[in-house]
Image (cartoon, grey):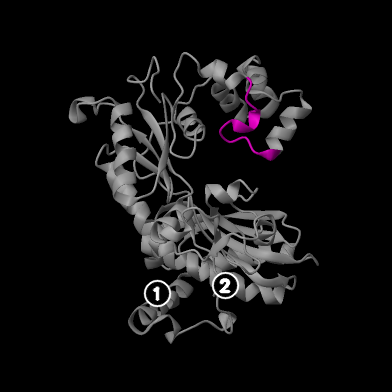
Amino acid sequence: MARHEELHDLEIAHLDCDAFYAAIEKRDRPELRDVPVIVGGRHRGVVAACCYIARTYGVHSAMPMFQALRACPHATLIKPDMKKYVAVGREVRAMMLNLTPLVEPLSIDEAFMDLSGTRSLHRASAAETLAGLARRIEDELSITVSIGLSYNKFLAKIASDLDKPRGFSVIGRAEARSFLAKRPVGLLWGVGKAMVERLARDGITTIGELAQIDEAELVARYGKIGRRLSMCSRGEDGRAVEPGGDAKSLSSEITLDRDLSNFSELRPILWRLCETVARRMKKAGVAGEGVALKLKTADFRIVTRNVRLRRSTQSAEGLFNAAEPLLAGQTDGRTFRLIGVAAQRLAAAEETVQDDLFGDAGSGDRMIETVMDAVRKKFGDGAIDVGRGFGVELKRQGPSKLE
């Protein structure tokens, strides 16, 4: 970015690390610099990340690994090292927090930043400060980032995707509506495949077409999301950058070694996933008010089911009791290659602990689980177990996600 009329007046940014996992692997193994790299599991897995060279062959994140290797058979395949990636992500986050306390993480490798009021502190505009941050990350961590700068979060995130890798793109107020007009409606915040298809049936395929419709009519047609559609189509987004970005869900999933269809085979795996999520909820000090089940069929169709709990929980037993009937309802003969579980609507766990003191239903199970946690902490994870999990080890478990 060399020049823009509003360059030094915009203060909301989105920073996204370029091909993060693959970039770290290339940094640590210089001999891979000029070859295609794919990060993920070889057996029945999916692509966790890939470098830009691999992308020229049609490889992309979440692609089934067999398809990726068919498209780019000479790629170097590397097993994910989440501990290493998390450490680098924390270094990037620390650099961001040195510039502003208003940092809202979206994932391990991306975050929003609000640099309002930092000009006097850094003696530079937000754009100049961000350019210095990108340079520092590249110099000190040997990875690159792309930055989008605008006047709200929606447009900043769009801008960060415009010129990857190593991009710095700006969307100002003056050109926002004209920039959006010819873009597809799928670019809008919160508009997924189903809504894209619904809008298309109504003859709306571009953001400009959406912007011409009165907000009241959009609300009447599409409900609450109609107001969001109206605002975003005009380049408006009133969301603030929220420091810490309170997580809404915590999940864990696994690609199975072989397709499974029987409830009796999937049930113990579900229990192990619930244990993993519960353990990480306790570590984070949160409890969930909802539970979601995720399944991927043998033909790669995603199935999700969720339920709201009567009372928040952070126990594996509580998660499992909610997820088990959801799983039973889906084991109808279809075969599945992936299963996952998530705790949703996360909040601080103090209320759950308080409920246990007064002996609510299920408090006995949680007391047993507390004792088991103490035994495992002292003697190791294998020191004590629950019968429904016997014989099941999640050796190929994917990383848990905090979202």
Q: Residue at x 39, y 60 (%)?
A: 28
The amino acid type, in three-letter code, at marker 2 is Trp
Magenta residues span 182-193
Q: Main secondary structure of the magenta part?
A: loop
**Secondary structure of the residue carrying numbered label 1:** helix
Residue underneath mark 2: 271
Question: Of the numbered discs in the image, which one, if any, rests on residue 370?
Answer: 1
Q: Is residue 55 visible?
A: yes
**Secondary structure of the residue carrying numbered label 2:** helix
Question: Of the numbered discs in the image, which one, if any, rests on residue 115?
Answer: none
In the rendered image, residue 43, in percent from the top left (x then y), is placed at 63, 69
The amino acid type, in three-letter code, at marker 1 is Thr
Classify residue 181 as left or right of residue 141. right
Q: Badge 1, how many Cα within 10 Å: few under 14, some, many 20+?
A: few
Q: Residue at x 74, y 34 (%)?
A: 197
Is residue 119 positioned above or below 40 on the image? above
In the rendered image, residue 51, in percent from the top left (x then y), is placed at 52, 51
